[in-house]
Amino acid sequence: MREILKLGGILLLICAVAALALAFTNELTRDQIDYQRNLASEKARKNILPDAESFEAMDEDRLNEIVEGNNRVAEIYVGYKGDSIIGYTIKSLSPGYGGTLEVMTGIDIDGKIRGVRIGNHQETPGLGANVALPFFYNQYENKSVDTDLEVTKTDATEDNQIQAISGATITSDAVTSGVNIASNTFKKIMDK
């Protein structure tokens, strides 16, 4: 009995030290992790709205007015060239096969989708995770926000169609849903 208590005490001590080390490491790296996330988001914004020279987060009151209870819109940034607004980047959250996907959509002031990038996701590697590759997300470029986009399992022949990734239709639908959320949000922004 005494030996079991001794082993239990040693195990408790090891676990406590490991937990403290993890907590310390987490606290030590938190700022760097946030910095890297912000850097990746800024790079994605620049990729999906390449003509913008700078980005500014939309005013929180205006953001709340536009999204009005739509918890699928995570953030909106205004893209500027000089002092002129040239477009918006809208990050939406869409349920996929493996969990929630972050879909960032860049829309120019004329209502054309300039680019789409996929952020955090838990989709299946080799299948659903392929939505984060250019052969898929480049399909959205230069599509109009005037009509909702649809996913098709065959060749995309219509202007509002996106060809699904074979074996990952749910994820393809999720990305397209995220882009449609961004398009509808853009229309609300332009209605003012």
Image: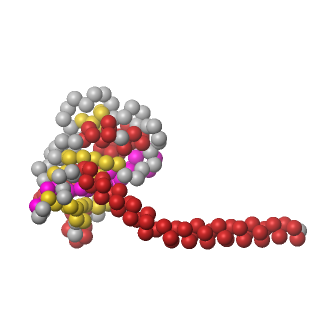
Q: Magenta includes 88?
A: yes
Q: Nearer the viewer, residue 64 or 5?
A: 5
The structure residue drawn at horizontal position 55% and vertical position 68%, both measured from the top left corner, is 25
- The quadrant of the rendering that contains the C terminus is bottom left
Q: Nearer the viewer, residue 59 or 80?
A: 80
Q: Which residues are magenta?
A: 84-103
Question: Dominant secondary structure of the magenta stretch?
Answer: strand
The reply to whether residue 180 is visible in this rendering is no
The reply to whether residue 67 is visible in this rendering is yes
In the rendered structure, the answer to whether residue 88 lies left or right of residue 110 reads: right
Q: Residue 141 location in percent, x, y? A: 22, 42
Query: Which color scheme does this rendered protein use?
Result: secondary structure
In the rendered structure, the answer to whether residue 5 lies left or right of residue 34 reads: right
In the rendered structure, the answer to whether residue 6 lies left or right of residue 107 reads: right
The structure residue drawn at horizontal position 38% and vertical position 64%, both measured from the top left corner, is 35
The structure residue drawn at horizontal position 37% and vertical position 52%, both measured from the top left corner, is 119
- The quadrant of the rendering that contains the N terminus is bottom right
Q: Residue 29 location in percent, x, y? A: 48, 67
Q: Magenta includes 56?
A: no
Q: Up-down: is 177 above or below 135?
A: below
The structure residue drawn at horizontal position 30% and vertical position 33%, both measured from the top left corner, is 163
Number of numbered discs present? 0
Q: Residue 89 location in percent, x, y? A: 24, 56
Q: Nearer the viewer, residue 100 or 82?
A: 82
Q: Up-down: is 136 above or below 84?
A: above
* Picture quadrant of residue 151: top left
Q: Nearer the viewer, residue 33 or 165?
A: 33
* Picture quadrant of residue 150: top left
Q: Residue 84 location in percent, x, y? A: 11, 61
